[in-house]
Every structure is written in C-alpha cells, then in structure tokens.
Image (spheres, coloured by chain):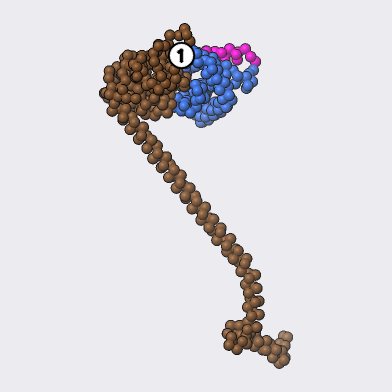
Chain colours: A brown, B blue
Amino acid sequence: MPQKQKRSPRKKIIVFICLVLFAAVIGLVTIRFSALNLAVPAAMMVRDTSGRLQQFLFVPVSRIRTLWESYVDVREARQENEILKARLAQLQTEITRYREALIENRRLRQLLDVKRHLNGKTVLAHIVGCDLAPWRAVATIDRGKRDGLMPDMPVLSQGGVIGRITETSMSFSRVMLITDYQSRIAAIIQRNRARGLLAGHGPDGCSLEYVEKGVDVEPGDIVITSGMDAVFQKGLLLGKVVSVKASAQSNLFQEIKVEPFSDVGKTEEVLVLLYSNIQGSKGAEKP
Amino acid sequence: MAATACLFILGYAAAVLQSSAGALLQVGLVRVDALAALLCWYSLRQDALYGAVFVVLFGLLISSFSIIPAYVFPLSYLLGFLTVRYIVSNVLELSSWQVYLMTGFVSMEISVVQLAGSGSVDLVWPWGVLQAFVNVLTAPVLMAVFGRIEALLKKLRKEKGELSTR
C-alpha cells in the first residue's frame, strides 16, 4: 500500500493564508465598512466583475424570458382570437336574422296596409318558385285549393296588383305575373279615366295598349284596374306611366310604357284576394 | 337502364333546382339549363324506340313545372331525341366538341318548339339563340357530371348484384 504523502507545513500556511484572504474579501464585500472606507476598492472590483457577469448573463436570459412570454401571449391571443371570431360569426348570424325579420316585418306591414284598403277576405302567401320556362313570368305560391284559392283570383303585393292565379293544386298555385308576355289586364288612367289594356313585356315591364292618339297621357300618370276584365276589382294600383311615344302615323294608338308598382322580381310575400270581379275598393283613388 | 335512371333522377332534380333558384341562374330570358344537355347525353346512349318512350314520359314529368301547355315539353324533347338519333346513325363517331355543338343545335330546336308552342315565337331571336349558346358552354361540365353519376349508378348496381349472388 502506498504511503500517504504528508503536506509540508509551509504549504499548509500558504493555503491557510489564501483562505483567510478569500474570507476577508468576501467579508469586506458583504459587511459594510463604509465609515472606514477600507473595503471600497475591493468591493468595487468584485461588484464590477460580478456586474459584468450579470450583464453577460442577464441580457440573453431576459431575452429568452421575453421570447417565452411573447410566445405565451401569442398563443393566448390566438385562442382569444378564435373565440372572438366564433362569437362574431354567431352575432353576425343573429344580426342577419334580426335584420331579415325587420325587413319581413316591414313588408308584412305594407301588405297589411294594402289589405286594409281591400274589401273581402285575403290570404297571405309566399312565393316559392318560378316557371321552368325562363320567358314566362310565372311564380309559384305556397297556397292552394286547401286555402280557398281558385284560378283567376287577383294577387297583390305591397305595390299593387302583381298578377292572377292561373292554376291551383291542393297546396300550391301558379300566378301569372303582370309582366308575363301573355298577361293582359283591363286598365284605366286614374287622372282622365282613359281606358286601355296593360300588357306584359317580360323584363321590359308593361305597356298600356289601345289608348287612342288624341288622349292626353303624361309620364307620371297612375294606371289602375278598370274592373272590366271580370278578374280584378276596379281601382287596384297597377303602375305608373314612364314614357309616352307617338307611334307611326298609320297606328291609331299611342305607345305608353308603364312601370309596375309591384317589384315583380323581388317580391316574396303576396296577398290573394279570395274573390274576383267585385266592384269597388276603398283604395281606388289612392296612388 | 342506368342512363334512363339518370335522365329521370337528374332531370327531376334539375327541374326543381331551376324552378326554385331560377332567378339566380337567369339573365334576361336566358337561364342555366341542364335539361337540354341531359336530353342530348341520354339520346346518345339509347335506341330510338326504347328511348323515345322514356323521353316523352320525361317531357310530361317536366311539363308539370311549367305553365306552358303540357304537350309542348314532350314534343320538343321527342324532336330533340330523334334529331340526335338521326345524326348518330349517320356518322361513324362523334368527337366531344361535335357533341357540344350538337347540344347547341338541339337546344335551339327545343327553344323554337317551346317558344312557338307557348305563343312566344318572337322571342326565338335573340333569347332562344342565346339560350342555345349558353347550353353549348355549359354542356362539357354537365355531360361530365352526368357521365360520373351514370358510372356511380352502374357501380352500385354491380355491387348490389354481386351481393345478391353471394
């Protein structure tokens, strides 16, 4: 077994002195001798060295901490953003529904106003479809024989007459709109009672036909039903004259273009009068 | 049989769609119409007599979606069918672009018969012609869809047959 080497007394003394000096430095740094100003240079030296170390370590550590915090913030923000987006979509749907209800309410109120001016029973119906042939201005409504509907019953919208029923089944009916190429309605001009026939022209609206050349017709004149066709009662609103053109000399009649009061393409709800050919209406003279 | 099933199922679906969302698919008096392309597609696959009967029945079904007289749709579709059969019997092979052009020609024929039959013959120009033009443009897409659905129906039928033999 090797014999343990003994340290020399001189070395022991050096180690002891070093330890004492180190303890003294630590002690001077930690214990303030500000009044004696003994520890100031050593403490400053230690602080400077430590400061440099701290500075060297603090910046990257703080950067890492900031980066981590940012990451956590972004994650939270993203989650929050998703929740808010979902909420926004939900609210948007609700707003659309309320707006839709509001618009429907307005339309129904207008229809109610129309109803107040009419004699007899009416049925509210919704437009659910159109004709398969694109050149026919025909709408399908969700009321039929079961609701008392029959062919030739007048159909009205907020603006006035929109058409008449042509076919019915138990739950649905077809309405020939006033803009259909085959629609003809006996009409008069409200101002001077001049008679004519309101003819449909598809997307071009309507025209008032068979009004003689001498008759005074002006743009803005109101056209109403005359009640002579045994379908529509007298005085229902049809449309407004938008232009009057003197046709060729050989033609006996004027070319009168009429814009229907009913917005044929945008109407969603209609009123069906559960009778036809009844004379008189409270709203006859009302534009 | 799969083609006939396609004619009735897809035709009915197209008629419902066109008559409920027609306003969205319409500009002026022209509408995206799948029925003319469907008729051409079917006519290319059927024998004259057998197919003619189904085409007339199909026309009657479709006429329930319109106010125009009930005989107009069967008549126009029958004429369209016979035209396609006549062309097919006189050529060796039709390439795709010729099929699409033929769809336009048959659409024109259908439009003329339907417009004349419903008392609006003066609308043939320009609306009938424009409708035929739109049908030519939509034919490639529609015919590809019809082909896919027919293949699917055949596959389903085959699988069903295999199951029943087991």
Locate residue A269, reporting x and y percent. 37, 29
Locate residue A257, reporting x and y percent. 44, 19
Of A211 and A142, the residue lying toward us: A211
Overall secondary structure of the magenta section: helix
Choose top left, top right, bottom left or bottom right for residue A28. Answer: bottom right
> Is A111 left, or right, of B72 in this rendering?
left
For the residue labelled by badge 1, is the local secondary structure a helix, a strand or a loop? Answer: loop
Picture layout, residue B143 above or below residue A85: above
Instruction: Pick out the residue farthest to the left.
Output: A120
Q: Residue at x 50, y 13 (%)?
A: B122
Residue labelled with disc 1: A246
Residue A76 visible within the image: yes
Q: Residue at x 50, y 27 (%)?
A: B25
Of A221 and A196, the residue lying toward us: A221
Of A93 and B83, the residue lying toward us: A93
Range of residues picked out in magenta: B77-92
Q: Amino acid at mark 1?
A: Ala
Residue A265 colored in magenta in the image: no
Locate residue B99, reporting x and y percent. 60, 20
Locate residue A52, reporting x and y percent. 65, 73
Q: Residue at x 68, y 86 (%)?
A: A18
